[in-house]
Image (spheres, grey):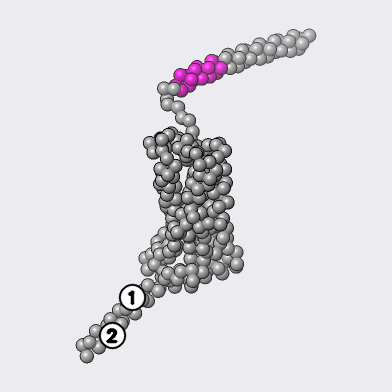
Amino acid sequence: MQNKAAIIILAIALGLVSIYQLSFTGATYKVKKDARTYAKGNLEKETQYIDSISTLTKDQWSFLGYTFKECQKKELNLGLDLKGGMNVILEVSVEDILKALSNYNPDVKFNTALARAKEMQKQSQSDYLTLFGRAFQEVDPNAKLASIFGTIELKDKVNFNSTNEEVLKVLDVEISGAIVNAFNILRERIDRFGVVQPNITQMATKGRILVELPGQTNPKRVRELLSGTANLEFWECYENPEVIGYLSQANNLLKEIQANTEKVSVTDTLSEGAVSDTTKKDKTLLDLI
């Protein structure tokens, strides 16, 4: 009897826990249903409705003390198979990375090898860097990659005596770092996007990233999120000692202009007064006549 009672208590406890966990799924489902009803098939309106709920605080909208965004994190993970959504494969352009690492070197052999590697990649599963090394060797067996990538940025890693194999190893490290940075940026963007339980993984082919977004049905918004580029601008600034002299000169010039303007104004006022007095005298003489 004691074992039977323990089993019943355990079953009740498990049932309560299950109901508690599933309640978050029910709460988010209701919000999404209201969004579909409000939007009437318009994906933009539906997205805006859900975003507006996601930004509300616990005082404005809550379920068991949780915001909508927190409820989304606790809801049941159905995945793409059950929930649907979008599956996107992104590829980091290794060709552009190589061009940037070479400071966009105009060398004909280098650019020919890049173009040839791009064509070879269409019929090969090898990564772009391997194909580039092979293509560069085919274009000119005696050419040296060190002459291409011996830039200021890589001066501590590549020198004139570096072999092609050594340069390719350095490039592989640089490209891997760029891919990791792109991977982290995508993850941060998706986290801010509010996608629940996304799956982001690097594929076997180097430079390709698989992104699974359960529940997302707006291709335009996802495309803008994933393909958007950052814009970093640099502006030349001056220190105060560099511009204080010019500001002082400008201040003195404004003082002179203001003083001259006041003098002209006073002179005009006096002239008007004189004319007025003369007119009055003339009128008086006319009255006497």
Task: Point out residue 274 in the picture as x, y percentages from the top left corner.
Answer: 66, 11
Q: Is residue 257 visible?
A: yes
Spatial separation of the CA atoms under disc 2 and disc 1: 14 Å
Task: Point out residue 139 in the picture as x, y percentages from the top left corner.
Answer: 55, 43
The image quarter in which residue 196 lies: bottom left
At a point 44% along the width and 50% down the height, the residue shown is 179
At a point 65% along the width and 12% down the height, the residue shown is 271
User: Is 148 or 2 nearer to us in this picture?
Assistant: 148
Q: Quadrant of the N terminus?
A: bottom left
Q: Magenta stretch mostly in which secondary structure?
A: helix
Q: Quadrant of the C terminus?
A: top right
Mark 2 residue element: helix
Q: Is residue 196 above or below residue 273?
A: below
At a point 56% along the width and 67% down the height, the residue shown is 38
Which disc, if any, is residue 17?
1
Mark sitting earlier along the chain (2/1): 2
Q: Is residue 68 visible?
A: no
* Residue farthest bottom in this picture: 1
* Residue farthest left in this picture: 2
Chain part drawn in magenta: 243-259
Neighbour tally class for label 2: few under 14, some 14-19, many 20 plus, Cα within 10 Å: few
User: Is 288 or 21 nearer to us in this picture?
Assistant: 21
- Determine which residue is flagged by label 2: 8
Going by the numbered disc 1, the residue's amino acid type is Val
